[in-house]
Amino acid sequence: ILVLLPFVVGVGVVMGIYLGLSRVPGMRMQRRLADWLQEVTQPAEEEKEAAKALVKVATEGPLPGLDRMIGGTTQGSAFGRWLEQSGMKVSISGVLLAALVSGIALAVVAGLATRAPWGLPIGFAIGCALPFLVLNFKRGRRMRTFEEQFPEALDLIARALKAGHAFATGLKMAADELPEPVGPEFKKTFEEQNFGL
């Protein structure tokens, strides 16, 4: 055993040195490559913020399940566009809940004011219609403002094109220089055109 023990220790040391010299450089290269790939694939903080700005985020309402269910239908998507055109940052479920709450509130007020059984349904109907009337008013006002500012935006883009700028640059100029509602709409158009949408 005393003769065999130094032999085993000597072979172990030689094999350890051999494996260390042959495997360690490869492991270092592998670690450097992994670090480099991690650095390349992880975007910088400003790139993360820009990527978040590219993602189209729908306004989350108090009942997101209802938003998804109604938004998936043809009438629901049309209603969603109608809400977007109004310029209000509300969701479908938010509008429906507001209509329900205002309907109940006006039904109670009408019932107490008239003390007649027909006051409750009339007050509820008027209360339910109130949020939709407000949204329709805001949508109409925003569309009229858009129609007034749109020729100015087209003129700005035309001047940019005559000055030798690209069409995308003209869109960006219109997005940056024009007020609400034309500016944000041109910004959306610029971003979607910029990313091939």
Image (cartoon, helix red, strand yellow):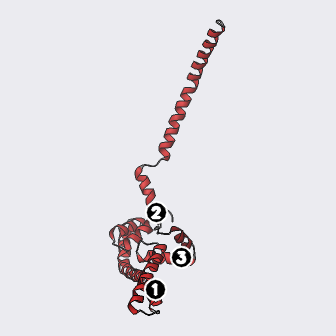
Mark 1 sits on what residue?
124
Please, what secondary structure does the residue beneath circle 2 have? helix
Name the element at disc 3: helix
Q: Which secondary structure lies at badge 1?
A: helix
Using a 10 Å C-alpha cutoff, classify the residue at mark 2 as few (fewer than 14 neighbours), some (14 to 19) or many (20 or more).
Answer: few
The amino acid type found where label 1 is placed reads Phe
Give left or right: position of 83 versus 5: left
- Identify the residue shown where x is 41% and y is 82%: 105
Q: Is residue 184 above or below residue 3?
A: below
Q: Which residue is mark 2?
A: 194
Amino acid carrying label 3: it is Gly
Residue that carries the numbered disc 3 in the rendered image? 76
Give the image quarter of residue 8: top right
Q: Quadrant of the N terminus?
A: top right
Of mark 3 and mark 1, the one earlier in the sequence is: 3
Callouts 1 and 2 close, C-beta under 8 Å = no
Foreground label between 3 and 1: 1
| Amino acid type, callout 2 | Asn
Q: List x then y, in percent, for residue 21.
A: 56, 22
The disc, 1 or 2, on the residue closer to the chain's N-terminal end is 1
Foreground pick, 160 / 69? 69
Determine contact: label 3, label 2, CB under 8 Å: no
Q: Earlier in the sequence, mark 3 or mark 2?
A: 3
The disc label shown at residue 89, or none = none
Residue at 52% over, 31% down: 28
Between 110 and 140, the one lying in front of the other is 110
